[in-house]
């Protein structure tokens, strides 16, 4: 895991990251939708490192509204997703989802029903974290405001695609 959060047990480590992800999502949904340059504007690495230490070493929450910095919120969101020990999207879900969408060409009415069943089963089995679906909802909301924030589907896919589907979390940056 690196040095950040080294003395924190695994469950608490992910819980701290989860609280930060939810705080970032809340801030972006309520304050950041119309901020130009979401997920492309540069961020302050020192501020990110300080935020990660605050979360992982101090167990403190970050007040994203008080920080009022969309680039900070975006980067904290992406780093916390990448650093989770438990992946948001289990690797075993892609083949059945792919099969459901291929079969949907023959039976379009059942495609979404099959995909929903697979995703709900993934949540029940613990291989799909509910936060994954919340993040998809946030990304949809952000994309709906792309005229103001510039975060088109392509920008969001480039920023999040690999991180959301990666089954091997990144190691946290050393502080």
Image (cartoon, helix red, strand yellow):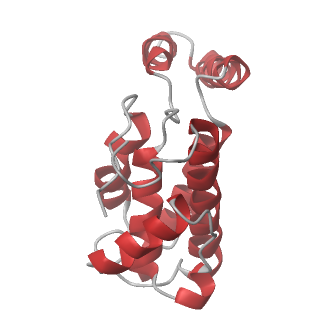
Instruction: Please name whichever residue, 92 or 113, is drawn nearer the observer in this view of the structure.
Output: 92
Res 58 → quadrant:
bottom right
Instruction: Please name whichever residue, 56 or 88, is drawn nearer the observer in this view of the structure.
Output: 56
- Asked whether residue 100 is in view, the answer is yes
Give the residue drawn at x 65%, y 77%. Answer: 30
**105 sits left or right of 121 in the view:** left
Quadrant of image for the C terminus? bottom left
Estimate the x, y position of residue 91 in percent, counting from the top left: 43, 20
* Residue 156 sits above or below residue 34 on the image: above
Quadrant of image for the N terminus? top left
**161 sits left or right of 121 in the view:** left
Estimate the x, y position of residue 6 in percent, counting from the top left: 44, 47
- Asked whether residue 38 is in view, the answer is no
Res 133 → quadrant:
top right
Give the residue drawn at x 40%, y 28%. Answer: 167
Estimate the x, y position of residue 80 in percent, counting from the top left: 46, 54
């Amino acid at each position: 895991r690196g040095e950040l959060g080294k003395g924190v047990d695994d469950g608490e480590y992910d819980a701290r990251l989860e609280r930060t992800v939810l705080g970032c999502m809340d801030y972006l949904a309520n304050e950041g939708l119309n901020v130009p340059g979401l997920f492309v504007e540069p961020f302050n690495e020192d501020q990110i490192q300080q935020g990660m230490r605050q979360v992982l070493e101090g167990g403190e929450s970050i007040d994203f509204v008080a920080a009022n910095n969309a680039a900070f919120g975006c980067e904290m969101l992406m780093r916390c997703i990448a650093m989770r020990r438990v992946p948001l999207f289990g690797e075993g879900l892609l083949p059945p989802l792919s099969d459901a969408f291929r079969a949907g060409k023959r039976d379009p009415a059942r495609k979404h029903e099959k995909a929903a069943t697979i995703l709900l089963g993934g949540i029940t089995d613990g291989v799909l974290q509910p936060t994954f679906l919340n993040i998809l909802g946030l990304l949809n909301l952000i994309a709906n405001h792309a005229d103001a924030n510039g975060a088109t589907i392509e920008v969001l896919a480039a920023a999040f695609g690999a991180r959301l589907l990666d089954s091997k979390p990144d190691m946290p940056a050393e502080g």
